[in-house]
Image (spheres, rainbow, N blue to C red):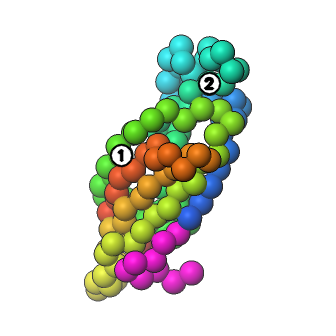
């Protein structure tokens, strides 16, 4: 897909207990809500693990981020499928690089927003 202003790129992922455990090893974020299942057997997924959805899309297009803003709206649990839509807000070619600004919204399988924000950077 060629990037242009207004383009929307989507990605979805279902988070597992193994994902949470691996992120604990990497980040050290081992709050009790990430290691002790709730009454339904679910763990709360770390916010920054959820935030890997828009960064994955940025990585797909070789975006070197300069700024990233996240607003965490509600918890994500293991077993949840999160759909992330990134909208290109600015796409401007300059000399040997391209500047990009994008906004994103992540929703769970029930259509509830769990995360939103924006990022800017350059495409390498």
Residue interval drawn in magenta: 1-9
Residue 39, placed above or below residue 114 = above
> Magenta segment, principal secondary structure?
loop
Disc with the residue nearer the chain's start (2 vs 1): 2
Q: Is residue 69 left or right of residue 35?
A: left
Residue 5 magenta: yes
The quarter in which the C terminus is drawn is bottom left
On the image, the x and y values in percent for residue 86 come to 46, 64
Of residues 77 and 124, the one nearer the viewer is: 77
Please report the residue visible at 32 percent of the width from the left and 49 percent of the height from the top: 69
Instruction: Report the disc number at residue 70.
Output: 1
Residue 111 magenta: no
Residue 32, placed above or below residue 3 = above
Examine the rendering and report whether any part of residue 85 can be seen.
yes
Please report the residue visible at 57 percent of the width from the left and 22 percent of the height from the top: 34
On the image, the x and y values in percent for residue 70 come to 36, 46
Of residues 11 and 27, the one nearer the viewer is: 11
**Tag 2 secondary structure:** loop
Compute the Cα span from label 2 to label 1: 21 Å
The quarter in which the N terminus is drawn is bottom right
Mark 2 in CB contact with mark 1 (< 8 angstroms): no
Of residues 59 and 38, the one nearer the viewer is: 38
On the image, the x and y values in percent for residue 76 come to 54, 35
What residue is disc 2 on? Answer: 43
Please report the residue visible at 60 percent of the width from the left and 32 percent of the height from the top: 77
């Amino acid at each position: 897909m060629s990037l242009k202003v207004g383009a929307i790129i989507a990605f979805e992922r279902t988070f597992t207990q193994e994902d949470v455990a691996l992120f604990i090893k990497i980040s050290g974020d081992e709050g009790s809500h990430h290691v002790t299942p709730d009454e339904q057997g679910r763990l709360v997924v770390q916010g920054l693990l959820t935030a890997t959805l828009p960064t994955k899309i940025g990585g797909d297009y070789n975006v070197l981020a300069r700024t990233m803003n996240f607003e965490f709206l509600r918890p994500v649990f293991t077993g949840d499928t999160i759909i992330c839509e990134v909208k290109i807000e600015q796409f401007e070619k300059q000399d040997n690089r391209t500047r990009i600004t994008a906004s994103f919204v992540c929703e769970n399988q029930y259509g509830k927003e769990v995360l939103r924000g924006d990022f800017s950077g350059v495409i390498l």
